Amino acid sequence: MSTTEEKAPLNFIEIKIEEDLKNHKNDSKVHTRFPPEPNGYLHIGHAKSICLNFGLAQKYNGLCNLRFDDTNPEKENIEYVNSIKSDVKWLGFDWGDREFYASDYFEKLYEYAIKLIQIGKAYVDDSTAEELSRMRGTTTEPGIESPFRSRSVEENLELFKKMKNGEFEEGSRILRAKIDMASPNIHLRDPAIYRIKKVKHHRTGDDWFIYPMYDWAHGLSDSIEGVTHSICTLEFEVHRPLYDWILDQLEVFHPQQIEFARLNLTYTVLSKRKLLQLVTEKHVSSWDDPRMPTISGLRRRGYSPASIRNFAKKIGVAKRDGIIDVALLEHSVREDLNKEANRVMGVLNPLKVTITNYSEGKTEMLSAKNNPEKEERGERELPFSKVIYIEKGDFMENPPRKYFRLSPEKEVRLKFAYIIKCEEVIKDKSGEVVELKCTYDINSKSGSDTSGKKVKGTIHWVSAAHAETAEVRLYDRLFSVEDPAGNKEKDFLEFINPDSKVVQKAFVEPGIKNFNIGESFQFERLGYFCLDPETSANQLVINRTVTLRDSWGKKKN
């Protein structure tokens, strides 16, 4: 076996960066940025971009800025800004003192627009939205030049100044770049770079009546910040010629834009518009609903930062769009929590078991491992008594062959406790099993078993006298089909999984009180869970993070 760890192959972005470093481009510096628009909460797709941009900066001893592209005040607010900062920090990344906003550069961006007018490369257009749309052309037909395209530099400067001063009605004029109305790339057909919006901005207030378009602000903000490698998703590939044109015309620092495939997940929607619709129409409780693919939703559900970072690493960086099975994300969560999460006894569907030969009123403390993957986590004490609860699914009155759990006249081991034998089945008037009468073998105590018995089945349990009552929310995938947004004949909302949230009462070992709010744990044999951040002193609320194994393959068959 090799004594050195085999290095992972470089992705195409790393190859480009290493080539730049080899050629001493940008003084051999690497400077990236993560540039979210503060118009919604970040989702798992953004997490991939966060890990990529901050990860590249870390790998090459560079810097990564956090910049909010806040150029559309109608859809942006401080709530989104704060949530984004929390999400990036939770994922484990730090932008230091490099928290920037496109709004920091509004004055500079305005000056750049003045310069573009002065060199005859921008003009004020009075056309209506309908006229602009008609003149734009199609993918097979060139656009039509605006009748205002020939305005003089002086007239354009005067009109643009009046736009800035709020002298025109909203929507009555725009500033357009003068490029090529016959370009096969529609984004180069005299795109709008400023529009009038008489809306209060979350940072600049009422200082501005005009706001830069995203395509104008984005590349120039990168340039102002000295970003060397502008990492974007593939939908911005067709915008790159426009960014290049703007930077070339203004003769400013030119970042290198590199596009990669955005994340698409099965059984998930990642469109901000659709996620906002889920929230506003109350199909989910909030942006941090544990069924949402938002980072805050995943955090509340019990996903760990490490599991998301590992997922981003596993899926890698591709040049072409594809779709990733959400099962890989769930596997990453299981993989991390299996190592990190302590174990807890919890019964979700309780069935009463009375141990008839156990002393009335007696309580015995039994030792249980906190985490078999980490011996250093030590052990805890579990109370054991005459009446316990087991899972209903761990008993079968008429079991099939090779059924190794509890059934009449059969024995099973209670984990960390004793071997019990079912002697009697109690049913209610409807015939449902409501209680089992069992006996235990006093010599079969786990860790000091002298009974000589060998049983194949082991089940979990809780002491009825000591159990905590909890509300358990069994979360599952929000959608029931792999591509909920891909059906052109049906609305994606029609595919919401009706069983994506099931609420029920459960009994949990008393040690649950030692866990912190938000902390993850494994219910033995059932899955991974966490204490919901909404937990109060009066109510114990537990969220299911993920089951112990993927059961969706079975559901589809």
Image (cartoon, rainbow, N blue to C red):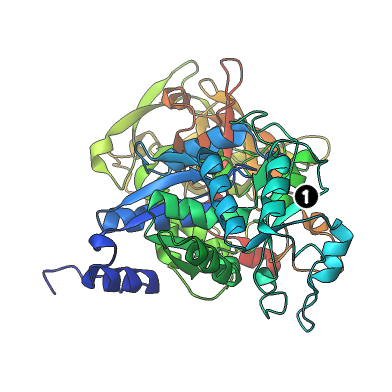
Q: Along the line of sight, which residue is nearer the eye, 131 or 509? A: 131
Figure quadrant of the N terminus: bottom left
- From this viewpoint, is residue 438 visible? no
Q: Along the line of sight, which residue is nearer the eye, 510 or 24? A: 24
Say if 401 sits above or below 12 in the image. Answer: above
Give the residue displayed 40% in from the left and 36% down from the top: 417
Residue 416 % position (x, y): 38, 38
| Mark 1 residue element | loop
Residue 344 % position (x, y): 45, 36
Residue receiving disc 1: 498
Q: Amino acid at mark 1?
A: Pro
Give the residue displayed 54% in from the left and 40% down from the top: 107
Give the residue displayed 78% in from the left and 37% down from the top: 167
Q: Could you say which quadrant of the image residue 89 lies in?
A: top left
Residue 132 % position (x, y): 82, 63
Q: Could you say which quadrant of the image residue 354 lies in?
A: top right
Image mark count: 1
Say if 473 sits above or below 515 in the image. Answer: below
Residue 393 % position (x, y): 62, 48
Q: Along the line of sight, which residue is nearer the eye, 203 or 292? A: 203
